[in-house]
Amino acid sequence: MCMNKNRKIRVNISIDRKMLEKAKMKLSLFGGKLSTLFNVYLKDFVESMDKNEFSDQRAMQKKIEELEKRIGNLESNEKGK
């Protein structure tokens, strides 16, 4: 069996409808794909987490806590709309 590490999978996510429409409109200006946009953001996130500043466990934990707080704030803002 051939194991292709670049194999793509389908992921279901929930996103803001208005933001999706705005993103699609802007992507259509240059023929971009929504999946490409998500892949770029995911790659950037993973690479930024792999950088040396996260090799220190305390620094990594602090960044994780900061990200959790930001995500919590975003979720709270969405629920309040």
Image (cartoon, rainbow, N blue to C red):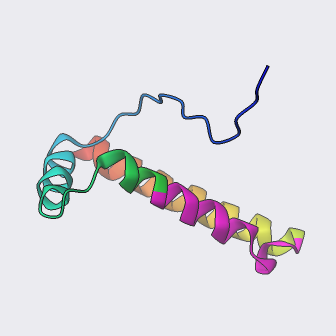
Q: Position of residue 25 (x, y in %)?
A: 11, 55
* Front residue of this view, candidates 47 and 79: 47
60 over 20 or under it: above or below: below
* Front residue of this view, candidates 64 and 81: 64
Q: Position of residue 39 (x, y in %)?
A: 47, 52
Residue at the extreme bottom of the image, as rendered: 53
Is 18 left, or right, of 44 in this rendering?
left
22 over 49 or under it: above or below: above
Is 67 left, or right, of 18 in this rendering?
right
The residue located at (47%, 60%) in the rendering is: 41
Residue at the extreme top of the image, as rendered: 1
> Can residue 69 be found in the magenta stretch?
no
2 over 21 or under it: above or below: above
The residue located at (86%, 73%) in the rendering is: 55
Magenta-highlighted residues: 40-56
Give the quadrant of the N terminus: top right
Q: Position of residue 4 (x, y in %)?
A: 70, 35
Q: Position of residue 74 (x, y in %)?
A: 39, 54
**Quadrant hosting residue 61:** bottom right
The residue located at (64%, 60%) in the rendering is: 46
Q: Which secondary structure dominates the residues rendered in magenta? A: helix
**Quadrant hosting residue 5:** top right
